[in-house]
Image (spheres, helix red, strand yellow):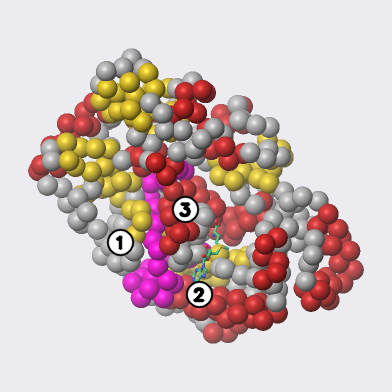
Amino acid sequence: MNLPEKFLKRMQERLGGEYPAFLASYERPPYKALRVNTLKTELVEFIDDPPFPLGEQIEFPECEEINQFYIEEEKAGSYREHFAGLYYLQEPSAMCVGELTAPLRKERVLDLCAAPGGKTVQLAMQMKGDGILISNEIDAGRAKILSQNVERMGIGNCAVTNATPAQLAQKFPAYFDLVLADAPCSGEGMFKKEPEAIPHWSENNVSLCAARQREILDCAADMVADGGCLVYSTCTFSEEEDEWQARAFLKRHPDFRMDGESDEYKIYPHKFKGEGHYCVRFERCGGETRNAKPYPVRRNAQANKAFAEFAKNFFTAPPEGEITTLDDGRMYRLPAGMPVLGVRTLRLGVELGEFDGNIFKPAHALAMSLKREEGKRFVSLSGEECERYLSGETIEKEIANGWCVVGFGKYPLGLAKAVNGILKNHLPKGLRRLF
Ligand code: SAM
């Protein structure tokens, strides 16, 4: 690899005797890993019948998560289990953030720099479907990918927003129990995985990144409630962006503290089977806790009737939670207390569907969040039929006319509408794949 000389010199100065081992770590290909989605499947079930061989478990000392595994499979993203959201592919070192977030109170959580969503998924699993998770991404294109991942993973207590940290800080002062700022950085730790970042590296770019991180951190700090935590992470080695950034933050924010060594991690590729990562936790002691206005629970009589008509054939029991029809005319299931966001929002809880006059039309998000036992009309497809469905084809099946969820085993892939022995494909066009 053609690594910048100045970068190598800085690493040599930093690592001293460990430098040869660090350099040797570039000889082997990057490690790959997955996280089993325990919101959708039992861990034992996945391990008993994995779509491809799983390697050893990835464990961090303080974190109880046991659903992370190394993998060798090159095409792990093209299995039907991936489309069904049974696992999320993630760089192994990036999973270390769970080490610092696992023990925290998490009723209100903000993932401030969230796309494509690895840490949002990890937070959602730690929250086990409870509380409110706001997952934000500043870049509109990346926010769309984040939103698709949240949907695929069946995360029901999440809103996906596309805002700047400053916009959010204005809306949510002292509101969150936990803010995660997985900040944009110079990416030194990912050179092996993303070599296209190498030519962009310079000492000047490191300084620019550090200045941007400082702004992000100051906004993040404003949103932490009394007793809440701010977790900051990067995938770089430079002290300007990591340790020095953390110390400078504490100087600017005396109401935050760090609890000694256990609150700070630095992962080097010659010491761990993964790339570079840095992670630190600050706790806010003092300040205030503020609330925010929740979304109103609104349902008009016509919408109620149309939804009830649909629900009686579709669900085994009426769905629980705060079901509301919003100004866009669509019906949503929101986590209790979901605040009015007031910024560009791509996803809000689970979109149940929309209305065409008196007719309710279900949404893909509803299918992806549904458990097998909650739906009356589940059609299990063969492996070959799954591929055809995911490619957008219709499928012949004898089933009574109407909406149904299609998938394999007990795992949904999406919606179809049965019409006289044909399942009409309602997988959103942007999610279709050719096999
Ligand atoms: N947390 C993500 C995950 O686990 O999948 C990875 C986040 S990535 C390291 C950093 C993100 O910060 C990028 O998606 C990038 O678009 C976003 N970003 C870039 N500039 C930003 C800024 N000024 N404020 C907030 N986020 C920014």
Q: Secondary structure at mark 2?
A: helix
Query: How many neighbours does mark 1 have within 10 angstroms: few (below 14), some (14-19), or many (20 or more)?
Result: some
Q: What amino acid type should be assigned to the residue bearing mark 1? A: Pro
Tag 3 or tag 1, which sits nearer the N-term? 3
Q: Is residue 67 above or below residue 312?
A: below
Q: Look at mark 1 in the image and give the residue it sits on.
A: 339
Q: Nearer the viewer, mark 1 or mark 3?
A: 3
Tag 2 or tag 1, which sits nearer the N-term? 2
Residue lying furthest left in this view?
301
Q: Look at mark 3 in the image and give the residue it sits on.
A: 145
Camera-nearest residue between 161 and 170: 161
In three-dimensional space, the C-alpha distance between marks 1 and 3, rounded to whole angstroms, equals: 23 Å
Image mark for residue 216: 2
**Residue at the image point whose x is 21% and y is 28% from the top:** 312
Q: Is residue 409 above or below residue 115?
A: above
Q: Secondary structure at mark 3?
A: helix
Q: Nearer the viewer, mark 3 or mark 2?
A: 3
The answer to whether 36 appears left or right of 192 in the picture is left
**Residue at the image point whose x is 33% and y is 46% from the top:** 350
Residue numbers of the magenta segment: 151-180
**Residue at the image point whose x is 31% and y is 40% from the top:** 363
Camera-nearest residue between 404 and 2: 2
Q: Is ligand 1 within 8 Å of the beta carbon of the residue shown at mark 1? A: no
Task: Tell me which corner region of the image, top left, top right, bottom left or bottom right, holds residue 265.
Answer: bottom right
Label pair 3/2, CB-CB below 8 angstroms? no
Q: Is ligand 1 within 8 Å of the beta carbon of the residue shown at mark 2? A: yes
Q: What amino acid type should be assigned to the residue bearing mark 3? A: Ile
In three-dimensional space, the C-alpha distance between marks 3 and 2, rounded to whole angstroms, equals: 22 Å
Image mark for residue 352: none
Residue 303: image location, x then y, percent: 14, 42
